[in-house]
Image (cartoon, grey):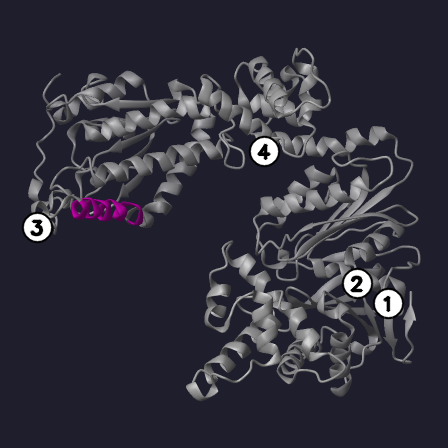
Amino acid sequence: MAQSTDPPQHEALGALQTEAISPLAGTMESLDTFELCVAFNREEARVASSITSSLPAIAALVDDLVPRLRSGGRLIYIGAGNSGRVAYMDCTELPATFSADPAQFLAVVAGGSRAVVEAVEGAEDLHDDGADKMHELQLSPLDTVIGIAASGRTPFVIGALKIAMERNAVTAAITNCRPSAIEKLGVTHPIAVLVGSEFVTGSTRLKAGSCAKQILNMISTCAMIKLGKTYRGLMVDVRAVNDKLNARGRRIVSQVCEGRPLLQNIRPHVAMQGTTENDDIDDLDTTIDALIQKCHGSIKLACAVGLSGLEPDTAKQMLTTVQGDLHGFICTLEAQAPVESADVRQQEDYFLCVDGGGTKCAASIASRRDVVAQGVAGGCNLNSVSLEEAVDQIRSAIDRAVGSLNGHSQGTWPRFQKAWVGIAGLHHSRQAKALTCRLERLLGVLHQHGSLSLTCDTSLLSSCMSTDRSINGCVALIAGTGAVATAFRRGPNDAISQVGRAGGWGHLFGDAGSAFYIGRRAIQTVLASLEESQGELSSSQPLSPLQTAVLQHLNCDGTDLLSTILCTNAGKQTSRLLIGSLAPVVTVLGLRPVHPDQDALNILQDAVECLVDLLKRLIKARVSDPSRSILALSGALMKVEPFKDLVLDKLKSQGIAFNATVLVEDPSRYAVDFLARSSHIKESVRDLAVDSETIDVTSQRLLSPCVLLEQRTGSTISV
């Protein structure tokens, strides 16, 4: 190894942050063992929080890295001493965990492979040796070179990075000091994480080493996820090469294929003796093991076969077309499913409508003649759940509806002529395009061809305008988990467009008048009254009806009411739903015919005032003319007749008279009936905030399932 010809580093060692003396240094030796361990652990715990400010830089590096790896480029770590060993450890794990090509993931350690297991003194000082190693690798612009140096001044790493930059490779540097010589090089992605002084001064195998390991783990793991090496957090690209990985692989196949006819799909592809339809779990495990063996240890391929029932070679080819992404494989499978299931030779044209709200997702299927099937799953508001979770709930609701459809079974869907999907939260979401793509694959319909319509859930109610051509407007008022009012207007050629919207801000900023709002007001009222009665003279007073009902519903007492709400385990969505679940408690108390509870009634009247205010905003903005519009009421609260009557009475007292008022108890059933009877439907996936939703309703006369509550003549008619 030639000594470096590069000018010597001039930074004083003592000026480096990693060389600073720990505040604990003066008392460290006097601590007992337990106190010493606590102090050490406290220092190490600072590492993760120190990395936080560098997350944008790390994410940008991963985004640059992934397409290069996909194109055959390499990830090359450069390090000396402990930094090199951490890099080597990360690289060696990737082939086993993710079936990564070892030739694409390299660790270049100062002093060579011997330096991984023992110290090679002086190797880190050889600037030219680092440069030579890069020349030997014949770097290209597809490669990514990451230098790791706690001090930011290691000559071996600097020499390597200089050559990498000359070869136009993507470069990054992970350091724990600033400013530093490496930072001055101008690498593509400088990542400086200041972890502070080490527990033992200068021992950078401690916090600096932990920092490097965490960042390298983050980079490689996130890159593998982006490359499709995982599926829902499962390492589907692991190869079963020992007993532990065999067991893990078997479990992964079972988890990925949950809800699919796994045994039925894989049985034809494995040679098993004595298996029956009633095999127990042990026999299923044996069958999965045989499948994994036939797939040459590839868990991902075994999952693909288990999901599809395809021959392994065919499934492998299909995986190749989606770059090995199991998620993409499943999307392709879903897009083909409706076409394949059409072989059931359906005699009917089927239409689908999905009403995806915050509490539940309802799917309705109709023929030309009638609504023939319905299914319900969990909530899919895009402001409360991920896109993946929303699609899962939509799939589940449709699958349950299909399960009750004659001639079909769950997992085998008919071909849908048209589908209308209304999703809560779409108005404020940036995921409309991504959701459209997922739904096209899932349902086998195309937005561009007019067979798929994606709107907010409120837009489903606009179809009530089809019952009366003299009506030129509609205002949909939904009061359920959330609260929102949306105005629609009939335009040229009978096209219906969304022209206004009020509310629907979500529980953090609005939803005034909703079930959540009522529940929150009830909790606030109870908390305030409990605080007022906390003195000794008031301690013997009985609880009010509202206090009693709220505490019983939440199964707590006054002392832990707030903690019961705030400490709900599953996060903000569960807390929101728990609060909203108090609305029925309040309506029962406040709307009972005899001796209604005044506290509860006040809350309900306030909620009604909020809902009417939503309508008044649309009227004031002149996007709705009540005299020529239908008021469509929907949501769980509107199904409570006394509450609905409070809303209508409030409107009447303020002189607001709509041409007609309808109660839509089941929007998905209502809208799918419209869809099935209309000749065509087309609309934009964008809401008013970007572009108008437009629904073409040129059609036959429709008989939609709703209740006409009142017309201006005062009659009440069921239609």
State the residue lying farthest toward the front: 540
Evaluate if marks 1 and 2 touch, with contact meaning CB atoms under 8 Å apart.
Answer: yes
- Which label is found at residue 707? 1
Which residue in the protein does label 3 denote? 27
In this rendered view, identify the residue nearer to me: 525 or 191. 525
Q: Residue at x 29, y 28 (%)?
A: 87
In this rendered view, identify the residue nearer to me: 157 or 571. 571
For the residue carrying disc 3, how many other residues have a C-alpha within 10 Å: few (<14), some (14-19), or many (20+)?
few
Q: Amino acid at mark 1?
A: Val
Secondary element at image label 4:
helix
Mark 1 vs 2, N-terminal side: 2
Let me know if residue 621 appears in the view: no
- With 274 as the anchor, is 76 left or right in this view? left
Q: Amino acid at mark 4?
A: His
Secondary element at image label 1:
strand
Q: Residue at x 19, y 46 (%)?
A: 34
Q: Residue at x 62, y 82 (%)?
A: 599
Mark 4 vs 2, N-terminal side: 4
Indicate the position of residue 421 as horizontal and vertical percent values.
72, 50
- Which label is found at residue 665? 2
Indicate the position of residue 244 as horizontal and vertical percent values.
45, 22
Q: CA distance from mark 4 to mark 2?
A: 36 Å
Secondary element at image label 3:
loop
Q: Name the front one of labels 3 and 2.
A: 3
Q: Is residue 172 above or below residue 285?
A: below
Q: CA distance from mark 4 to mark 1?
A: 43 Å
Mark 4 vs 1, N-terminal side: 4
Q: Which residues are magenta?
A: 34-49
Q: Quadrant of the C terminus?
A: bottom right
Q: Amino acid at mark 3?
A: Thr
